Image (cartoon, coloured by chain):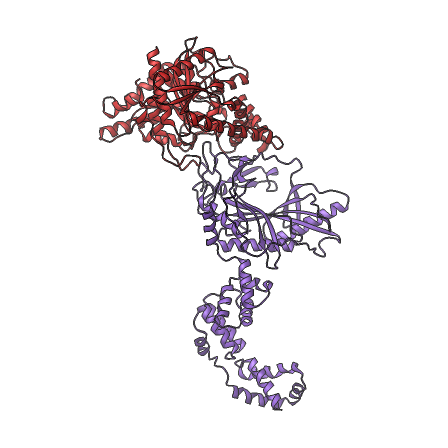
Amino acid sequence: MSELPEQGQRVGTLETDNSKTVEGVLPEGWEMVIGLEVHVELATTTKLFCGCANNFGDEPNTNICPTCLGLPGSLPVPNKQAIEFAMTLGRALNCTVLPSIFARKNYFYPDMPKDFQTTQFEEPTNAEGFVQLPNGRSVGIERAHIEEDTGKSTHLGGGGRIHDATATLVDYNRAGVPLVEIVSHPVMHDAETARAYVAELRDILLATGVSDARMEEGSMRVDANVSVRPIGNDELRTRCEVKNINSLRSLGRAINYEARRHVDLWTNGEEPKQETRHWDEDGGRSTSGRSKEDADDYRYFACPDLPPLTPTAEDIAAIDAALPALPAARRSALAAAAGVEIADTTLTVERGLDMLVIGAIQAGADATVAMKHADQNLSDGQGQLTLESFAALVVMEVDGLLSSTQVKTVLGELVANGGAPGDIASSMGFEAMDTTELASLLDGIIATSPDEWARFLEGDRKVQGHFVGQIMKATQGKADGKVVNQLMTQRANQG
Amino acid sequence: MSGAQELAASIRSGVQSAVAVADASFGAINERDDEIHAFLHLTKQRAQIQAQAVDDAVANGNDPGPLAGVPIAIKDNMCTRGEPTTCSSKILEGWRPPYDATVIGRLEAAGAVIVGKTNLDEFAMGSSTENSAFGPTRNPHDTTRVPGGSSGGSAAAVAADFVPLSLGSDTGGSIRQPAALCGVVGVKPTYGAVSRYGLIAFASSLDQIGPFAQNVTDAALCFDVISGHDPMDATSIPNPLTPTLPTVNDGVAGMRIGLVDELMGEGIDDDVIARTNQAAEALTAAGATVERVSIPATIYGLAAYYLIAPAEASSNLARFDGVRYGQRVEGQNVAAMNVATRSAGFGDEVKRRIMLGTYALSSGYYDAYYGKAQRVRTLIANEFATAYESFDLLLSPTSPSTAFEIGAKSDPMALYMCDVCTIPSNLAGHPAMSVPFGVGDDGLPVGVQILAPMLEEARMFKAAKALEDAAKGMS
């Protein structure tokens, strides 16, 4: 331990005060306590302990070998890429990477070939980190450990679950796929924060490239541990673990349902049973699964087939050096460059437009205008739009060379096909209107709208739209509204 | 049949054909194995193909390898592609692995001819080869007696001269003790020296594959072939190993050898102690200095072993659930099928150890049992390390007694005591071997054990050869 370098916090700070209640979800005086366990499949080329391909969707039982089938005599050998991905994820979650030990979690299940899962128990690879959410709050992470996935069972007959099935088919392609289980502290108190946390995790996974993080394909699986307590109390009451949550929407619904169920039980003088529950998205409710009252004794012990993982200071430094910019840092950078609040940068960063905007600002573009385009006009990403052309377009817009309608049109063309904004504007005939021409047009409209002009002179700015509208109509939108405003002010000052 | 080294030499030089040697081996097995029951399964077709390939290589002027045409028997807990591999358990009856253990590939690459799979105590749990679902193996020196275990079939196959070499596995003495009882050489290498890939695990942190041979030189030759790094086994030692065969005749002059006090008293038969003292004298006569040394923690070895080994076994044997391979007994649901399959498929001793191990790992008992046993293990390793600061090798009896009567030890504890001298090396991960050294009062073979520090097999074989030479002079 002492030989490990100082692994400083890379980003932001840890705040633990996430206390907040959502009105309308729980009765007055109650709060939820939510901790999430997120399983993430690592996007490695091969499985965690053998050379079989790690491919989703292949023909069942084609990516298998003695090791991932748990055949007698087979042995596991750790996959270097999986270990590196797990450490990368740990560092991206602001965790400390520690020497770690693989352990066996012993229980019988037909899709688990060895009837034990190789995981990490007392000594996980990544410990104590946090995720910073766009709203500035942080969610503490207890650990992010490496483990192997199980096979996939398909239960035939009955309700599609093991206890009433007539037969079960098992696909072992998934057995041995590397997972990282990210365990949060129970520090979230509303479904919205839980959703924001999972969304942020997904963005981090995509940014680091360690997982494709698809909830619907199961490469990112969220289990929610939910309990409730009276506000002002810091006890942890009996929790239920809700599984089978397949989308962010389900996550919010499942948490709210479960918390409400607990409050109802406590209010009726009953106590929730500690158990695993199954979220039924169609029915909008959770149903009882495996009881944890006679909790399984998993008889964890260090796996004798796998030596401890002992990353060196150099290994960790190399992981840190290769980390890409992460969402939280990108939001901070954008907020600083554009002079806006961090909360206002979320959309732009999610769309991956932050570098474009920051670059354009540095190249002389107006920050507000650049951010406006990123928010409103680039919802499908930047396409063929380059930093230079984006900056040039914003400058043209601010200089009044193009109307806002024209800017949108040119921007659309730049995204679709690229090019230089000046050339595109010319080819579309978007020459800026001559100011003298606009001035004479304005004079004509003033002449035909004396009442409106009088109100404008009296300070009624609402009639401004009348004049701008008339000019736009006359010029078929080619006029720049801002220039018209300037001309009107000039005219008024002239008396 | 001559020794492995001479056989390989005569086959490589075309004096004998590998096919003829394999036939002779099968002939000897055919003649006497009904009585001994060393083999569970003969791999005649595979042997035929391999022997022919060796002969073809010789005919074409190619080198078939250092074990050219040498017949070898394999303990039936090592996977052989397409051939039955049962661990002497009903639960694996009928299973044919789709792959070869690493040692199998290395042996065949060196020209060895695998003739069959040998009997063992079910899942290597036992010291007499009586706990086999397919019946006991008998000691070739006296067929009313056990051959020792758990690798009794492999020991008996060499002792009966069916084959010059065989492989066993040693978790707590399962190579050395049967070697002693059958009067052959048996080697438990350094943990990690020989790949475990394809060895069906009993206790993964203790299991190690090693050779049986009729003489020390053949054991060294076989060890050199099967040892070395294997990327398929994460516990395999990555560094290249020193070959042992070139120095096997170098003698013990100047070596400091410690005779382990704790293994020379209570619980060890007088005739065995007498032979071990004679072995110490023989080493002294050969130029070594022998002194007594105390390694107090060895007396806790047995207790620690019977927590650690069953604990690992309880996890390793979970996979025999009837879902994917081997026997299945149907039940109303998956859990009932698991229970019915395991109840019918495992023998009593296996069930006993699964229960012991499950208990030792249980929440609330882990620290008192498994945790404490691991601390004893560390203590034993530390005491060995201290002893090896003053000594090059250690010496002790291999087994407390010579071969006992079949059925004589019905109490499990009495059988567990058979491994008292051998277990400490497994716990420490060090190499150790048994060498025949005369006979006991009953005229049956006695083995003495040579223990060495980590990866000092070459040194161990030198002392073993010196004892072998001295024993020849005695008789």
Q: In the image, is A421 to the left or to the right of B162?
A: right
Q: Position of residue B199 (x, y in %)?
A: 44, 30
Q: Which chain is red?
A: B
Q: Where is residue A483, by image quadrant?
A: bottom right
Q: Nearer the viewer, residue A129 or A351?
A: A129
Q: Give the drawing colour for chain A.
A: purple
Vertical placement of residue A92 versus B371, above or below: below
Q: Position of residue B36 (x, y in %)?
A: 41, 15
Vertical placement of residue A460 versus B30, above or below: below
Q: Quadrant of the C terminus of chain B?
A: top left
Q: Residue at x 54, y 30 (%)?
A: B375
Q: Position of residue A477 (x, y in %)?
A: 54, 80
Is residue A472 in view from this perspective?
Answer: yes
Q: Quadrant of the N terminus of chain B?
A: top left
Q: Where is residue B360, by image quadrant?
A: top right
Q: Residue at x 59, y 59 (%)?
A: A134
Q: Position of residue A435 (x, y in %)?
A: 52, 86
Q: Nearer the viewer, residue A313 or A161?
A: A313
Q: Residue at x 47, y 29 (%)?
A: B201
Is residue B84 in view from this perspective?
Answer: no
Instruction: State how many labels appear.
Output: 0
